[in-house]
Image (cartoon, rainbow, N blue to C red):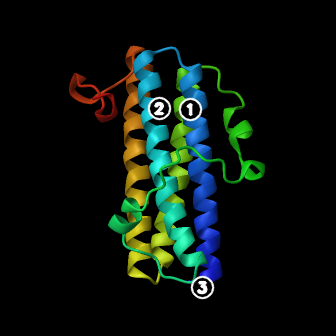
Amino acid sequence: MSEQTVLEVLVRAMITEQDGYDFYMAAAGRVEDEKGKAMLKGLANDEIEHLHILQSEYDKVKGGESFVDLESARADLPTEPGMRLFPEKSNLGAMLDGVTNDEEALRVALEFEQKGYEMYSKAAQDATDANAREVFEYLAKQEDGHYELIQQTLNYLVDDGMWFFQDGELPMFEG
């Protein structure tokens, strides 16, 4: 990939992560179940970590450097949480249209995570830099894990009317 293409992919990815954070926080404010709120806030925190990794890589590439390895990008996380990068490019309004209950919020989240997975998988496949491939594969795996959690939660919510957590345990981000 050319440097310009890499920068475009990183910008698109940062917008996606920002939208994910905004969506999960807004959805957490709309759901009634406290465990559901906690799960959505945990997903929002993951999106911020992803955004910071992407920002670190963007800064390196924009400065004429190569991608750094995943651990270095994670160690270089900014201390300022939740920055607003591209408010004019946000899709949050469209994502929240029609979300009036927990089930609809989870269905939108599934769609969102699927698109993120596809974007990162393609970026990893197209990457010519090993560190870029590592970062994009990590992010694709994260999106896939989110998708699985949301799908299981949706299945449980639809079948039993309650939020799902594997084996009855609290999610990791709950402590």
Q: Nearer the viewer, residue 33 or 69?
A: 69
Determine the secondary structure under disc 2: helix
Vertical placement of residue 86 versus 31, above or below: below
Name the amino acid type tagged 1: Met
Left or right: residue 96 versus residue 172 is: right
Checking the image for residue 25, the label placed there is 1
Q: Earlier in the sequence, mark 1 or mark 2?
A: 1
Determine the secondary structure under disc 1: helix
Checking the image for residue 41, the label placed there is 2
Residue 100 is situated, as x and y percent measured from the top left of the image, at: 64, 20
Residue 61 is situated, as x and y percent measured from the top left of the image, at: 55, 77
Name the amino acid type tagged 3: Ser
Q: Quadrant of residue 34?
A: top left
Between the C-alphas of marks 1 and 2, the distance is 6 Å
Vertical placement of residue 97 versus 81, above or below: above
Residue located 67% across and 53% down the image: 85
Q: Earlier in the sequence, mark 3 or mark 2?
A: 3
Checking the image for residue 2, the label placed there is 3
Residue 109 is situated, as x and y percent measured from the top left of the image, at: 54, 38
Q: Quadrant of residue 58?
A: bottom right
Between the C-alphas of marks 3 and 1, the distance is 35 Å
Residue located 27% across and 29% down the image: 175
Pointer 3 and pointer 2: residues touching (CB < 8 Å)? no
Q: Earlier in the sequence, mark 3 or mark 1?
A: 3
Between the C-alphas of marks 3 and 2, the distance is 36 Å
Name the amino acid type tagged 2: Lys
Q: How many marks?
A: 3
